[in-house]
Amino acid sequence: MIEARHLRVLRAVSTTGSFSAAARELGCTQPAVSQQMKALEASAGTTLLIRTGREMRLTQAGEALVRHASGILAGLTAAEEEVAAIAGLRAGRVRLVSFPSGSSTLVPGALAALRADHPGTRVSLVEAEPPRSVDLLREGDCDIALAFRYGATGGEWDDLVVRPLLTDRLIGLLPEVHRLAEAPSVSIGELADESWIAGCPRCRRQLVEVCEEAGFAPRIDFATDDYPAVMGLVGAGLGVAVLPELAVESVRPKGARAVPVEPAIEREIVALTLPDLARVPAVAATLDQLARTAAR
């Protein structure tokens, strides 16, 4: 295998015309240059230099190798500089996928702080709910997935690096004219006879499970993944809903009142990445900023 350090020596010998002059240019000894040239000729499997008296000239193979060496060494230098920039967070790219309420609450502050600290790092964002967001991570279509789950599910994320961010409590959303709108809290059982407005599929499944534990099946008349639409329907008096606190924070409810739900229903918000990606400086910096933003 031809090594880059040997190519540098060959190019120096070609430029200067002798081992001793090449040694001075490279800052090494003449025997070291001679030894590396012998190693290069052994790797190439042919003679690269011919000595004629005090002069040296390249063979046809040597000329071909020098011609290619310039491009190879220039490309290697550019690659080394780019890698150093990425390692030093002067450059880099992170592909982030997040669920909507995370996109509107956690992501903006984290990315603004990341840009201020590392302006050369670029972050792209697309939205997807788990488990689709987690699938995108495993398929290599993103570097970090912002996700959530209700209760720990054994083995669900065992192959991933899990960075806990915060615990998000579910909040009851009632029309302002509702009989319980001014209550300090409300139990799920008190809403058994209400018309329900359900959110994303995972949240909808959790709602059904919680209601069943309380002894009733919710009558879901409306279902939408759009949180502003949920709040609009509640504000219009068309039903009640239970939404994550992050979602309520991201949209000001009009005509609706947020009321704590008892017993408390919580979901865990995390940032996920692959083990190898966690060692990439730009990915690690983004995870750190997400954690700092969530802690505020």
Image: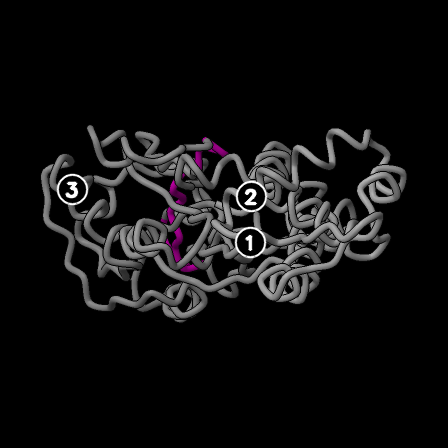
Q: Marks 2/1: CA distance?
A: 6 Å
Question: Sequence-wise, which precedes: disc 2 or disc 1?
Answer: 1
Evaluate if marks 2 and 1 touch, with contact meaning CB atoms under 8 Å apart.
Answer: yes
Q: Which residues are magenta?
A: 164-179
Evaluate if marks 1 and 3 touch, with contact meaning CB atoms under 8 Å apart.
Answer: no
Label 2 sits on what residue type? Val
Q: Is residue 35 above or below residue 208?
A: above
For the point 43% across and 44% down, which residue is it? Answer: 259
Q: Is residue 229 above or below residue 177?
A: below
Where residue 219 appears, as percent x and y from the top left, is 15, 59
Q: Is residue 7 above or below residue 267?
A: below
Q: Marks 1/3: CA distance?
A: 36 Å
Q: Quadrant of the C terminus?
A: top right
- Taking 270 as reference, is 134 left or right? left
Q: Disc 3 designates what residue? A: 209
Question: Sequence-wise, which precedes: disc 1 or disc 3?
Answer: 1
Judge whether residue 278 is colored magenta.
Answer: no
User: Circle 2: is it few (<14), some (14-19), or many (20+) Cα within 10 Å?
Assistant: many
User: Circle 3: is it few (<14), some (14-19), or many (20+) Cα within 10 Å?
Assistant: some
- Secondary structure at badge 3 equals helix
Label 1 sits on what residue type? Val
Where residue 18 appears, as percent x and y from the top left, is 83, 47
Where residue 127 appears, as percent x and y from the top left, is 43, 62
Q: Quadrant of residue 66?
A: bottom right
Q: Disc 2 designates what residue? A: 283
Q: Is residue 15 visible?
A: yes
Query: On residue 178, which mark appears?
Result: none
Task: Kindly report which numbered mark, 2 or 3, lies closer to the viewer in this rendering.
Answer: 2
Evaluate if marks 2 and 3 touch, with contact meaning CB atoms under 8 Å apart.
Answer: no
